Amino acid sequence: MMLHSPDEIILESKVAFLRQPTSFPESTYHVEAIETHMSWVFLTDSHAYKLKKPVHYDALDFRTIAARRHYCEEEVRLNRRLAGSVYLGVVSITVDQIGNLQLGGCGATIDFLVKMRRLPARNMLDYAIKDGTVQTGDIGKIAALLSNFYHGLPPIPIDPAAYRNRFLVAIHRNLRELSTISYQLPVAQVELVCTAQHAALQRMSGWFDERVRAGRIIEGHGDLRPEHICLRPDLVIIDCLEFSPEMRQVDAVDELGFLALECERLGASELGVMLLDDYEKISGDRPDPGLIHFYQSYRACIRATIAIRHLDEEKFRHSAEWPRRAMEYLRLAERHIQECAKSVHSIG
C-alpha cells in the first residue's frame, strides 16, 4: 500500500530532494538552488533542472500536476525554436511505496522538471555587458538570428482595434498598480508617464493598425532579456515565456525594443541602438522610431510593476532593491515616452 499520494508530497520535500547531488542521474559535486516567483532551478555541474511552483497568478495557474506537466512540455517545445540544443526534455519526479523520491522512477508521478544543458554564466549577454566583453559581431548575430526567427513565424490573426486595446488596458493597469500607496512610488510621475502613453496610443493608432495589417504581430519569445541570451560557443536564446500565448503575441520590433531597453538599463544603450539598426538593415522592417520608443516606454512600465510587486512578499518587503529597480524602469519609461512624443507631435 502506498504511504504517500502525489498531492501529499509538498513543495518543500521536493526542493529538499533536489538539493541533494545524489538525486541526479549524472555525477555532480554540487547543486545550486535558485528560487524565482514561479519556479525553483537546480544547477548541477552540467545540467539545469526547473521545477515549477504550484502557484496561481493572473496570467498563469500551476496548481495541478497536470498543469505543471503541460507547461513543462510547452517550455521545451517553445524554447527549442531558439535553443534546440539546450532543452533536453521533461523528466518526472516519482515516489515509491515507502516514500522515496526519484527522478524518472517507476513509482507514482508527483511532479515534472524541465531538463536543460547548463550554460556558462560568463557567456550570457548580461554578464558580457557588465564585463565589457561584448563584440560588435555578437550584436549582428543576435539581430540576424531574430530576423530569421520572426520572418519564419506566421502572423497572428488579430483585429487592429483589439491589438491597440491590449495596450490601453495594460496602461490603465500599470497606472493603478504603480500608484498603490504602500509602494511609495512618485504618483505624479507615474500619472505623467501613463497619461502620455495613452495620448500617444490614441494619436499613433494608424501606426499600430499598419503593423497588424503588415503581419508584424507574431508569436515571439515573450521575455527577451540579456540574461536569456548565450553568446558562445553557439548563439542560443532561452527562457521563452511559456505560460501565456497572448503575452508572446508581440510586434517583432516591440520585442527587440525591449531587449534594447534592457541593454540601456545595464549601461549599454549603444548596443541597443546597434541591435535595432542591424535588425532594420537585415529585415527591411523600418517602423517610425516613435513607435519603438512607445513600445520601450510601455515595457519599462511593465517591468516597473513586476519589480515593485516583490514588496507584496514578506521576504522582499524590507528590501531596497525592488523600489530602486522600479524607479529605474520608471525613469526609462519617462525618457522613452518623451522621445516618442517628438514623433507623435509630427503626425498630421
Image (cartoon, rainbow, N blue to C red):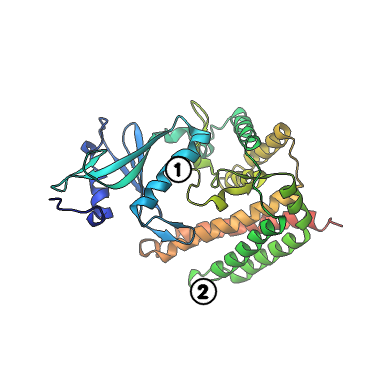
Q: In the image, what residue occupies the spot 64% across and 69% down?
A: 191
- In this picture, is 184 found above or below 77? below
Q: Amino acid at mark 1?
A: Glu
Front position in the image: 71 or 29: 71
Rendered location of residue 248, percent (x, y): 56, 48
In the picture of the structure, the residue carrying the numbered disc 1 is 75
**Crowd band around label 1 with a 10 angstrom C-alpha radius: few (<14), some (14–19), many (20+):** many
Front position in the image: 202 or 259: 202
Secondary structure of residue under mark 1: helix
Could you give the CA–CA distance between mark 2 and mark 1, rounded to whole angstroms? 36 Å
Rendered location of residue 84, percent (x, y): 48, 31
Q: Which mark is residue 251?
A: none
- In this picture, is 37 found above or below 189? above
Q: Is residue 230 visible?
A: no
Q: Is residue 175 left or right of residue 307?
A: right
Front position in the image: 211 or 39: 211
Residue farthest along the top direction in this orientation: 233
In the picture of the structure, the residue carrying the numbered disc 2 is 181
Front position in the image: 229 or 239: 239
Q: Nearer the viewer, mark 2 or mark 1?
A: 1
